[in-house]
Image (cartoon, rainbow, N blue to C red):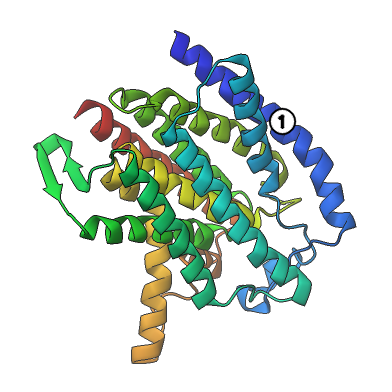
Amino acid sequence: MLILAKTALAMMLGFIFAIICGLIFIPLLKKVNFRQHVSDMVGERHLKKEGTPTMGGIIFILPVLITLFLLYLRGSITLNHNLIIVVFVFLAYALLGFIDDWLKVRYHNNEGLRVSTKFLLQMVIAVIFFYIFMKNGGEPVVEITSLNIVLPLGWAFGLFILFLLVGSSNAVNITDGLDGLCGGLCVIAYLAFGILSWNATWMEGYQEVAIFCFVLVGSLLGFLLFNSYPAKVFMGDLGSLALGGAMASIAIITRHELSLALIGGVFVVETLSSMIQIIAIRKFNKKIFKMAPLHHHFEQLGWSEQDIVKAFYVVGLLLAMAAITYGVWL
């Protein structure tokens, strides 16, 4: 029961602070003219979103920091290297996303940072994570617990971590294309990782990492009140990169790297659809999808934005439940 009480408190505080932040920051973002530029390539229905405030990720990032700080002052959580490393990745990718968003706002386009520059900075954050992780007793192995298989990767584990962090942050970023889509899927994903973290009793700071997840779930639910269709604010790269990076870091420290692909299955499919489309156009001069990523394909088929989001939620929830079953029970 104590676990449920801690979970409820974490989600409640995150939710309340997110509502407060939304009421404060949305008018402020409008005032300083931090508004989204919408490309005409995504279709006419998205053009009406031109001028919607962006960088709304601050609405759920700040509540997480405030809640963790208050819980620490109260003595409800302790600082440990696993919590610190997750928060570091969360904030580092948020900062990278902020720079990208600011450049888009500054120059009134959707270009932001050059792809090579963004990728390089993402790798730098991943390398720092790898160093801290290994310095604090991390083992370069991948475990398949249901089959009792342990795969020692040695130096290749660094490349594996790099792939997970960079891939996850970009996958969540790609999925952030419809009102409420990315935020809702991340609620489901972090709920799953919160449960998996509570079960990782062998890990130092497992309770704190779980509480981080549930605080973020509450904060995202508060954010969704402003981001659901029709969105009053977009999370921007500030939010999506932070969410994807932190998700991968939690998967790594809890030794659920393979579960990440299942919990984030929708993010994976969205990314694959974009990659397949790019390859098909460049190599064969033809399209596989009407538009990529996949959510835009369904839009082109005539689906409403709300129906697409609901369908993706259902798939994400089913995958998350399967991952919890595998990670906790099997």
Q: Which residue is mark 1?
A: 17
Residue at the extreme left: 148
Residue 135, percent across and down?
33, 44
Q: Quadrant of residue 327?
A: top left
Task: Determine whether 39 is above or below 212 in the image.
Answer: below
Residue 16, percent across and down?
71, 27
Label 1 sits on a secondary structure element that is: helix
Looking at the image, residue 202 sits to the left or right of residue 247; the answer is: left
Q: Quadrant of residue 44?
A: bottom right
Residue at the extreme top: 1
Residue drawn at (36%, 52%) of the image? 130
Residue drawn at (82%, 54%) of the image? 29
Local crowd size for mark 1, using a 10 Å CA cut-off: few (<14), some (14–19), many (≥20) = many
Residue 267 visible in the shown view: no
Residue 148 visible in the shown view: yes
Residue drawn at (70%, 71%) of the image? 104
Q: Quadrant of residue 13?
A: top right
- Quarter of the C terminus within the rendering: top left
Task: Determine whether 69 is above or below 84 in the image.
Answer: above
Looking at the image, residue 142 sits to the left or right of residue 269; the answer is: left
Task: Determine whether 217 is above or below 73 in the image.
Answer: below
Number of marks in the image? Answer: 1
Residue 174, percent across and down?
51, 63
Q: Nearer the viewer, residue 276 or 315?
A: 276
Q: Nearer the viewer, residue 183 or 136?
A: 136
Q: Nearer the viewer, residue 22 or 139?
A: 139
Residue 137, percent across and down?
28, 38
- Quarter of the N terminus within the rendering: top left
Residue at the extreme front: 135
Amino acid type, residue under disc 1 in the picture: Phe
Looking at the image, residue 39 sits to the left or right of residue 35; the answer is: left
Looking at the image, residue 8 sits to the left or right of residue 142; the answer is: right
